[in-house]
Image: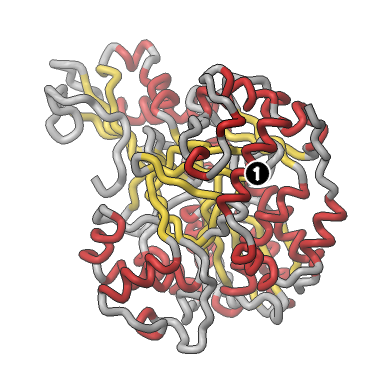
Amino acid sequence: MPKQTIPNFDAAFARYGNASLDQLLDEQHAGDPQARVLALFKRCVEQVPAYRDFLATRKIDPAQITDFAAFQTLPMMNKADYMQSYPLPQRCLGGSLLGADRVAVSSGSTGQATFWPRSAAYELDVAVRFEQVFVDSFAAGGRSTLAVVCFALGNWVGGLFTTSCCWHLARKGYPLMVATPGNNKAEIFRVVRELAPHFEQTVLLGYPPFVKDVLDAGAAEGVAWAEYRTKLVFAGEVFSEEWRALLGRHTGSVQPCFDSASLYGTADGGVLGNETPLSIAIRRWLAKHPRAARELFGESRLPTLVQYDPRSRFFEVRDNTLVVSGENSVPLVRYHIADKGGVLNYAEMWDFLQQQGVDSLAELGLPADFAPRRLPFVFVFGRADFTVSYYGANIYPENVAVGLERDDIARRVTGKFVLQARETALGDKELHIAVELLPAVTPDPGLPETIALAVKTQLLRLNSEFAHYTPVERQLPRVSLHAFADPEYFPVGVKHRYTRKAEE
């Protein structure tokens, strides 16, 4: 078996650092993404022991996978049958951790962490996504910029991954300073007050509800967000265009398509795509035309809509969920990421818009001279499994169930519940848990708080993302108690669902 060639960061950065953003993105037109993903498959067969065994146990002959049509017949990876079934080194290129120099961690459904090693050289593909946002949206090539990382720092993927990619931009020559207060609001305010006056613009990067908390609390303390020409970068959750406008009022936004951007990323795959001025303009138009949105996406709610580079991260769709392939220290080949969504190429999107009567960028609210990137689109509703996303943390029903199993609670409840991340009237997020009482139980007034504290304790114990992503003041869930067989949450005769989307 050929050994893995450990990525050379200096060589990779020389290539990245000497190429303009236009050159980097134009490369995707010069090559065939299908041929590239087929080459990735062949490399994994040669260099990844776990993947060879994964195919062998399913009686797949790699020699028969000679074209893209055959590639599409390959079995999909997922966490259960691949990531959690093989030792970590065997899932790496070369069958060793030696090619990786850093690691990220994500929580599992039982609190068991999944580790994602990677090399700094592989971050450069992801750095291009940040570069798109900073250049195309924020014009950071010609403006001195303070980037304030508000994601949780530590092994969790958001904070240090974001920091590292922003450092790559600074090393490339952008007039960018990176500050890393993490999700500590007092430190964020201290950094902003001291440094923001020395820069032409300030960018806050964090999970959507936490960024709103920062803006609200900062305004209450007299932080002049508008004076600092504050821009926003989000990741981790779907939000409405009304919510984007609400935050824009805090920051003094006058160009909503250029003043914020959301990233679509995962711990396993890195940043897979990013909002662009074009994708935001389209989404804002669709928010005003719900019939068109339903026709395009198949649902009445708006998904996150981003553009992506198919040479970096290659998407397929299976049963309305996304499948991604991409090179990394743990490479992904047809990896099922359990996100509900779909893909549209650039021409398909414009054909649809023209069918709806949109014939120009100006009709979408963009400047007439704006030159969009002709990249395909991926739309994401969120997890298709039973998790709830809260402040960027995946909250699992199993974590909540443990809190209800305490003796003094279990004798009064059935163990059934419905978990939701809901938006309050003020636009904040709260974690709501509807709990079913046992028949004939009359609860005492303190039971909701007792349950909330028990669930919080277990979430902090079992779910490291919850513990580190969620602000302390937002960690206590709101619990409502409901009679046995309550028709709203616990109807009789139907399969119970432990999670519910906020719109339901």
User: Which colour style is shown?
Assistant: secondary structure
Above or below 412: residue 369? below
Lateral position of residue 417 relative to residue 120, left or right: left
Above or below 311: residue 176? below
Lateral position of residue 413 relative to residue 266, left or right: left
Kind of residue at badge 1: Ala
* Frontmost residue, 339 versus 443: 339
The residue at 32%/72% (across/down) is 353
* Frontmost residue, 441 versus 272: 272
Determine which residue is flagged by label 1.
39
Residue 86 rendering spot, x and y as whole percentages: 63, 20
Q: How many marks?
A: 1
Under circle 1, the secondary element is helix
The residue at 27%/71% (across/down) is 288
Q: Residue furthest bottom?
A: 368
Residue 402 rendering spot, x and y as whole percentages: 42, 19
* Frontmost residue, 274 versus 312: 312
The residue at 13%/16% (across/down) is 440
Above or below 450: residue 185? below
Q: Is residue 131 visible?
A: no
Lateral position of residue 386 relative to residue 185, left or right: left
Residue 371 rendering spot, x and y as whole percentages: 53, 81
The residue at 70%/48% (across/down) is 160
Disc 1 crowd, CA 10 A, few/some/many (<14, 14-19, 20+)? some
